[in-house]
Every structure is written in structure tokens, then in C-alpha cells.
Image (cartoon, rainbow, N blue to C red):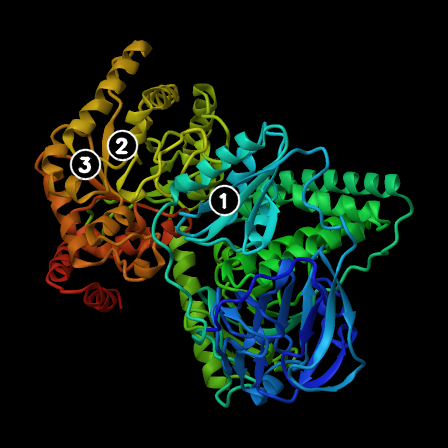
Amino acid sequence: MAPPLPDDVAGATLTIGAPLAGWLSGLEEVADPVFAQRMLGDGVAIDPTGDCLYAPCDGEVTVLQPSGHAITVLAADGAEILMHIGLDTVALKGVGFSPCVQVGDRVRKGDPLIRFDLDAVVCGAPSAATPVVLLETPGYTLARARADGLVEAGETIFTLHPAAAGAAEVKAASGGETVERTVVVPLAHGIHARPAARVRDALFGFSAEVTLAKAGRSASARSPVGLLTLGIGFGDEIVVAAQGSDAAEAVAALAALIESGMGEKGHAPAPAQVTAVAAAPALTVLPADGKLPGVTAAPGLSVGHARRFKLAEIEVDPAGTGVAEEQARFDAARATLAERLEREARHAHGAQRAIVEAHRALLDDAGLLGGAAAAIRGGASAGHGWREAIRPQADALRASGNGRMAERADDLLDLERRLLLVLAGREDTPLTLPPETILLAEDLLPSQLMALDRAHVVGICVERGGPTSHVAILAASMGLPTLVALGPVLRQVEEGTALILDAGLAHLHVAPDGDALGAARQTVAERQARRTAAKAAADKTCHMADGTRIEVFANLGSVADAELAMANGAEGSGLLRTEFLFLDRDTAPSVAEQTADYQAIADVLAGRPLIVRLLDIGGDKPAPYLPIPAEENPALGLRGIRVGFAHPQLLEDQIRAILSVKPLGQCRIMVPMIAGVDELRRVRAVLERVQADFDVDQIVELGVMVETPAAAVTADLLAAEADFLSIGTNDLTQYALAMDRGNAAVAGAIDGLHPSVLRMIAETARGASRHGRWTGVCGGLASDPLAVPILVGLGVTELSATPAIVPEIKALVSSLTLEAARAHAAAALTCATAAEVRALAREFTA
């Protein structure tokens, strides 16, 4: 690492040297519109002849892409220089790149930054041209120092001159003094989308202009998109600054919110390994065996033919016809799109609804709207102004070095496209594709995926993307096998080629022989036959092969979930998550609001049991109107029923709403995060007091959610006073193994089939049976076909699974006998590890 730098002189001219040797040219020569159209900023490009990227000036490394192909250096007065080795080199997954520095390192001009394999870049990327760009910086203008031609590393390629006096002035003349406060971010995952939205919401009622700044870069605190581009992570030191009459109050409120952790205070996620190779190695030619590796976004197997899709760019006239007219066109188009998104959200459910609602929220982003308005005032058309507001933000997310943030760029580009189509008076027409299409694309946007003809498209393969993108989440919710991050080699697959897409094994088999095709088609047919048979029998009452009754319920979070559960033969709901009513709002829902929502779900279930879990927030699910003090370990703090005890009116109102659902008794009440009988008694007292107001004698069942080891080992004591026990295996697993499922460093080792967890489930069932109470499972294990026979063998008589998998679970249970399940469970309890249990389970279900 270089020694500390001397203080920079504000306003001085900076000289920027060539970071590598090669052929110098203008950005307009780069075969990528993001650089050629200077969407990120002005600069030059160098086609390299060397294999090392050097620091172009003194400064600090602020961004280093995890794959090592791009880096940003912060020079004096906030001037940031981005260097991007080759085009589309992110697809190389870090192969051939060896960073010499880390984020935060101070460097001198000429210090090595990244060593790279030039041959790998030339062979594996569309172009080795390396843009060197001054990211948008108000305080400087750029001037080329030499013409196109050969350049040696270190030669001056452009200079940065200070802008005219006052051009970069921060304070308004009449705005008063700027109030600042430095804050260390305690959020385990940094300021991502949800905390960014809460930061914005916290400023309602304040008139001050507030910004957050990190490493010399700042963004409006009222713009969630702008905050995402800062890439604020756990432990980062940021500056909260405000200017205006209530600046001090705004800074104090915002700093307090951030320092509270917003329910996400904890340990930093495991650091990404910059030089690590991703699951899908970069290839330049199709492999000899025809099996092209990718990253699984949605599992499954499909057989079909390659059909290529390329997203056409929407042409936009850059010049406007007048500020008032263009702003009016923009406002009208935005209102139309908002109405469409709201309509789509009403008719969607699950992941689709969540993503549509996220797009609707982005449409109100103050930073995007302000950017579009400024461009329109500068003479741009409505469409061009929107594009100028969106693209830099999307590019900044992709350049943030954070994989999840980069995947959110697609949401911005989707929003851009949809508004441009409204302005043009058009709508995206659904793709007309032949049957058995496996769609190949450079990338897909969420709205395009939702518009696909599911009857004809049997799989998706994408060059780019990631397993946590919204496209991946949507594909999984649609049951559509999908691979992402296959790289540019996917372009070598010819239209119409026969394909086997095995997303479970994470590869695309190109042009397989007849035997492989036949075997794959047979497997697909067998799986489909099993699904069809299970769906056909799903409306039958579930019994084991020997006649033993096992109830198969569904976990719900909305009316749409209830409708899907009924279509799949669920016999009731073993878990209604009521958090959907309480989160993402400024005040708690009223009794009337809660009653209406619970009644709507109960009506869909048509008299079938509905087990309503009392509010389970805190920890990873904070509510802004219920301030929870900063906690060293939120998973062990104020959450679950403890929040209800801390806010007794909230608890009483929810019980009152549940008792208002007709018919009385259809709803059963389940208490989350119980640790002892005393807590159950406190809830029972509230229930009896509220029930007395209704003047009814009918008993409303009150059960316990077993999520803590304390509840599991005292199940017999709880069952003496509870009407039923239901095991939440997700939390029980993390507490039994002492592993935080929100901590990336250990989450991968969490497995509900660990012997310790299975023994707690067995103890729970034994304790319940002593008092004639039934035991259910409403956690993730109830949806795992490998786990179900073991659960039944341990004494579980009710399984509450995800709605889509209910038919499969019912079919599986109907094939079992209680004697075989008990013997299998007993064998599982003797295993030493979760891996041994899973191996045993695979043999049992084979």
C-alpha cells in the first residue's frame, strides 16, 4: 500500500495518466452505448497491449468489482476515474484478473491496480477496449491531452480543470449553515433497498435538504435509488448532512434511525472473495460434451429448442418541443404507468405482486423524478429526460461492486422501458413463440418474463443476470427452469438447436444425441405425470396408505395465497402470517382493517381451519411505527410475542379482530416465539378478557408455535395448557444450531434435518401426545419431500406447506405407512450429521 498522500489542493488542475499501454481513442469508438454515449461520463478508451492496469493519478480506491475487471479511483475534490478492462468482461467471472489493491487503499500514480491475462480478455470478451472515464463530477471539466494513437502507461491522456467559480457551490446563499453528523452504519447488510426506503420515509415532515455521503460521494436521502448507488455497507462511516430551517432536527432523526440498526443490526456478511471463480466458469467456445454450465436461478428439467430473444432499444427523440409540453407529457405517462402497475399488483400474487409493487415505488423516487425534470428543463424530450435520469443510476448500481445491487439495475431499466412505451403510445406485445421453446437471451426484464406464454416456453437461459435478481425470483415462482450467467458463449447456440435444460444440475446440454434426448423426455414425462396425478387427487382428504389421518394445510400471507392453496387442495391453513398487514406502513392497522383482511381469507377457505399467527415482527421484520431500541443480537431480543407484551394495545386489537371473523371458531390463534408457560398464560388472559366482550361461550383454540429450544424441551408443560403445538422449523433450527440464518457467514450450514433439530421435534411431539394435543409443522421442513416421512414418523399429524407444493406433499403422504415412517424416523435420529440424514432420506424416497 502506498504511504499517506499529502492534502489535495482544492480547485487544482489534475493530470490523468494512461493506466495501461495501447491504442488511445475516443469513447465514441467503444462498441457499448453506455460508454460511447458517455452515459457514465466523459473520457477515452485504450485498446491494451500490456497486461497490467496502473493508477492514473494519486487517489483512493473506492470501488473494485468482485470479478476484478473494473475499478474506480477517487482523486482530489471528488473526481472519480473509472477504468473498465474490456467490454462485458464481468462474464469472465474473475478468471484472468488479479487485483493488487483493495477498496480503501491509497495509491500513487503508476501503482499497479489489476494484473490481467490479456489473451483471456481478447478471446473471452467482445472487445478488449478499456474505457477510462471521469464519472460525473460537477467540480471538474475534462480536456483531452493528445490525439488518437499509441500511448505508453503513465503518459497524460486528459486533464481535469476546475469548473467556473460557484459552479460546484454546496450551500445555497439563503439556505443557512449545513449541519453534519458522522455515523458508523450498524446494519448487517448495509443500506439496501428496504433501509433506503425507511431513510426516505423518516424525512416526511422535514423541509431541509438532506444528503448521505460516503467516500466523497453523496446522494439525496430522499432518493432510495440514489442511496443504493453509494454502496453503503456494514461498518461504513457516512456523513449525514442537512441544510434548511430544521436541518439539525432532520440530521438528529436520521442519524438516530441509522444508528438504531432498523432491526437489522448485527454482524457484517461474509466478505466476497474478489478473485473467486463463480459457479459457472467463463467459456469462449461450447464444451466438447455440449454441456454449458450456468448458475441455477430456478430448478427444473425441460427439453426443447433454442429460440433467441433480443431486446430492441426504443428510439427516443432527444430534443423536446417545449418545457411545459414535455413535462406535461411526462406527468401524464407516469400517471398512466402508475395506474397499470397498481392494476397488475391487484391481480398478481406472491413474488409477482412484490416485484410490481417495488416498481410502483420506484416510479415515485424523488431522485429519478428530479433528474427527469432537470433534463426536460434543459431542453430534453420527456422520453430522453427519463432515460437520462434512469441510466446513470442503473449504471452506478452495476458498478457498485455489490452483486445484489447490480441486479436491481434491471428493475430501473424495466421501468425506463415501460414509461417510454407509454409515451410512444405502445405496449410490449407478448412474444409469439413455438411450443417447447427454451428462450435464450442476453438479459430479460421482469415485465417481459411475466408476459411470456407459459404454455410454449419451457425454460430460460440468460447470458447475464444473477440468482437473486427479480427475473430469477419470478422464474422460480412460475416453476420455469432457468439458468443465468452462462456468458457470451450462449450466443454460439444456433436458432432451433435441440436443448436439454437441467437447471437442477446447472447446465444446458446443447445438441444432445438421441439417447440423451429420449431419456430426458422420459424423465420430464414421469415428473409431469406425478404432478398431474397429485393435482388430480389433491382435493381428497389426506390419509396414509394404512389409513392414518394426516392433515395437509398451507402457509398463507394473502388472499391470493389462499386462492392458490384451495386450487391445490389444501385442507386449511396452518399458518397465516399477519405481518403483511403491519409492515410497509406508517401506522398500525385498525381492528376493522384487520378484521376485513382476515375475513376475506377465511371466506376463501370456506370454513376450513385458519390458524392465525399473532404478529411476529422485530428482528429482521421491523415496523417504523414500533421503534425497537438498537439490539446487539435482534434474533434474541424484542421480537414475536415479546413485541405484543411491549405494546399491549396492539396485541389486544389483533385478538379482537380475529374473534370478529365469522364463523367464530374457524380461526385458531397461534402464539409466536414462546419460551415458557408464563407467556402462554399472559396471552390466554388477554384472549379471555376480550372474548368476554363478545358475550360468547364457544372456545377459541389457542396454540403455541414451537420455535425455541426452551419450548421444545418443555412441550409437555406447554401442551397441558395449549390446545395445539405447531413447530416453526426455520427459527427452531437457527436457535438449536446457534447459527443466525441472516448471517451469510454461517447460513449455508443451517439444515433443519440436523439430528439436534429432529430430536427437538421428536420431544415436542412426545410432550404434546401426553396431553392428547396434536403437533404440526409450519416451517420449511413441511415443504421438503425428504423431510416429510421423517416428520410423520416422529409423530407430526399436520403439515402446513407452501401452497404450490401441497399436491406433491399429499401424494407423498398417501404412499407411506406409519410403521415404515416410524422406522425411518428412528434411523434418522441415530445419524450424526444432517448430510447423513439427507442421504438416508434419499434412499427412503428413491
Disc on res. 675: 3
Is label 2 or label 3 in front? 3
Residue type at tag 3: Ala
Q: Quadrant of residue 58?
A: bottom right
State the CA–CA distance, disc 2 to disc 3.
Answer: 10 Å
Q: Is residue 826 left or right of residue 62?
A: left
Residue count near mark 1 (Cα–Cα under 10 Å), binned few <14, some 14–19, many ≥20: few
Residue 101 lies, in percent from the top left, at 48, 73
Is label 1 or label 2 in front? 1
Tag 2 residue:
671
Q: Is residue 115 left or right of residue 410?
A: left
Q: Quadrant of residue 125?
A: bottom right
Residue count near mark 3 (Cα–Cα under 10 Å), binned few <14, some 14–19, many ≥20: many
Tag 1 residue:
194
In front: 783, or 498?
783
In front: 89, or 296?
89
* Residue located at (37% from left, 49% from top): 806
Is label 3 or label 1 in front? 1
Q: Is residue 466 left or right of residue 806?
A: right
Residue 16 lies, in percent from the top left, at 68, 73
Residue type at tag 2: Val
Labelled pair 1, 2 in contact (Cβ < 8 Å): no
Residue count near mark 2 (Cα–Cα under 10 Å), binned few <14, some 14–19, many ≥20: many
The kind of secondary structure element at disc 2 is strand
Task: Check the image and report above or below for 703 versus 529.
Answer: above
Residue 533 lies, in percent from the top left, at 39, 57
Residue type at tag 1: Arg
Q: Quadrant of residue 846?
A: bottom left
The kind of secondary structure element at disc 3 is loop
